[in-house]
Amino acid sequence: MTTIDHTLLPDVEGAWPSAGPAQQARWIGTALGVVALILLSVVLQATVVSPLRYARDQHVAYGSFRLELADGTAPVGQLTAADRLLEPGTAVATVEVPRLGIDEVVLEGTTSSILLSGPGHRRDTVLPGQAGASVVMGRQAVAGGPFGRLDELVPGDEVRTTTGQGEAVYEVVGVRRSGDPVPAPLASGAGRLTLVSASGTAYLPTDVLRVDARLVTPAQPTPVAAVQLAALGGQEAAFSADVSGWPTAVLALLGLGLAISVLVLLRRWWTVGPAWVVGAPLVLLAAVLASEQLLVMLPNLI
């Protein structure tokens, strides 16, 4: 009968920590370190990574939208040429605010995940340039904060938009916050664009900021509405989070916990150097994935 030399196998039992006070303190320190790692990852995602991702997504969206404008296939309403609702995230317009240096591609939808890639058009409103009320939301701070300076606009400032129907010019008529009077109902054939973002301290806003602008160029033909306010999900409203990311976030956090456990075991089986070479990349990757999902679950206007 063949015998197994147990000296060649790792001491699995010895790898698991004891329940002594020193070991308990070590595990508490590890847990606090994990929490700090997650928080740091989220902060880095919000302040460093998300602006880079935003710039990339805007570059891609601008390229594809420019081709659609040239081909005459850019969206002109809530439906495609095949009478299907536009896919969330589809480029539908550009918005330019010369006073603030804003020049962004507007995407269909206003969920938190969409607004990480660009300002979002609220799906139950008309496209910019058409008769009626059009609403575009954008972030205040995360992803570079494209709408972070809306409160600097004053009556008379110009807002320009471009869609598949051509260019339109709006004139700012006012900035309002919660509790301020709402604009009067639009006259037949008139148009209004409302830019929406957060108000208050960056990353810690306290209110919704709205900038109303009236259409000064002739209104473009306006298709019949296919999406009503009641059809919008709760995650498309102002200051709503994209809760659809919870399952992925939980899996990412579990993956982070597993990666840290592997690193702890490797440090007990191997020397410190090889353990960190193998385990650290796993922990960093898991932390990045977890922070991405947690960022999506932040309110959409932050």
Image (cartoon, grey):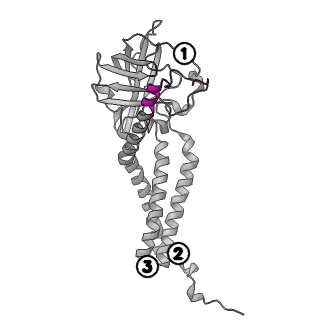
Decide: few, some or many residues near mark 3? Use Cα within 10 Å; few <14, some 14-19, many ≥20.
few
Residue situated in front as seen by the camera: 150 or 170: 170
Which is closer to the viewer, label 1 or label 2?
1
Question: Which residue carries the number 2 mark?
Answer: 17
Say whether disc 3 or disc 1 marks the residue closer to the N-terminus.
Answer: 1
Judging from the image, what secondary structure is the residue with disc 3 in?
loop
Does residue 232 sit above or below 293 in this rendering?
A: above
Judging from the image, what secondary structure is the residue with disc 1 in?
loop
The kind of secondary structure the magenta stretch mainly shows is: loop
| Residue at horizontal 67 percent and vertical 91 percent from the top | 3
Quick check: can you spot residue 176? no
Three-letter residue code for mark 1: Pro
Residue situated in front as seen by the camera: 176 or 75: 75
Residue situated in front as seen by the camera: 196 or 69: 69
Query: Outermost residue toward the top?
Result: 188
Q: Position of residue 215 (x, y in %)?
A: 39, 13
Judging from the image, what secondary structure is the residue with disc 2 in?
loop
Question: Which residue carries the number 3 mark?
Answer: 271
Residue 25, by quadrant, is bottom left
Three-letter residue code for mark 2: Pro
Q: CA distance from mark 3 to mark 1?
A: 68 Å
| Residue at horizontal 49 percent and vertical 19 percent from the top | 126
Q: State the extent of the magenta-drawn residues as a range.
A: 64-87
Considering the image in quadrants, where does the N terminus appear?
Answer: bottom right
Three-letter residue code for mark 3: Thr
Question: Which residue carries the number 1 mark?
Answer: 223
Q: CA distance from mark 2 to mark 3?
A: 17 Å
Q: Position of residue 26 (x, y in %)?
A: 45, 70
